[in-house]
Amino acid sequence: MGVSDLWNLLRSEGMVREWNCETDGQLAQKAVAAKLEGKVVAVDVSLWTCQALMQGALVEVFPDEEARVVKVAFDRVSHPNLFGASGICSTACNLCMLLSAYGESITSQPPM
């Protein structure tokens, strides 16, 4: 389960820094790398699992559902390595099953 309105709560406490990738791209990347270097980052793959199962473009390359999930989870968990951090996989719940049971679709992506 997530925290309701988490990003607004963090933003109101001054814990979120907004970056404009077009103007601050290299600066942002250096700042992130400096903060993450040598750290361990937990990546919640629940939403990424849903994305892997629902992303049509992946079906052409990975027709098997498990292969799509492994590919996307691996990409997301290994991403912190680009910043000198170690990624570990975590899951919060089986969100996909709940959403598919109610016919919902996922339209948002988690922040990077």
Image: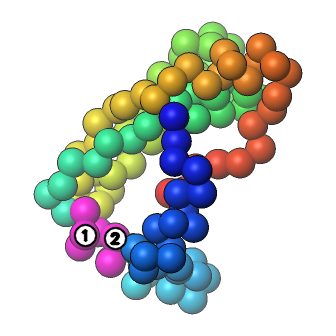
Residue 98: percent from left, percent from top: 69, 19
Residue 31 in magenta? Answer: yes
Placement of 82 over or under 12, stated as above or below:
above
Indicate the secondary structure of the residue bearing disc 1: helix
Q: CB under 8 Å between callouts 2 and 1?
A: yes
In the figure, is residue 16 to the left or right of 36? right
Q: Amino acid at mark 1?
A: Lys
Indicate the secondary structure of the residue bearing disc 2: helix
In the figure, is residue 72 to the left or right of 40? right
Residue 40: percent from left, percent from top: 21, 48
Read off the residue under disc 2. Answer: 32
Residue at 42% over, 80% down: 14
Residue 6 in magenta? Answer: no
Residue 107 can be seen, yes or no: yes
**Disc 1 crowd, CA 10 A, few/some/many (<14, 14-19, 20+):** few
Q: Amino acid at mark 2?
A: Val
Q: Which residues are magenta?
A: 30-36
Read off the residue under disc 1. Answer: 35
In the figure, is residue 49 to the left or right of 53? left
Residue 57 can be seen, yes or no: no
Furthest toward the left, the residue is 38
Residue 70: percent from left, percent from top: 48, 22
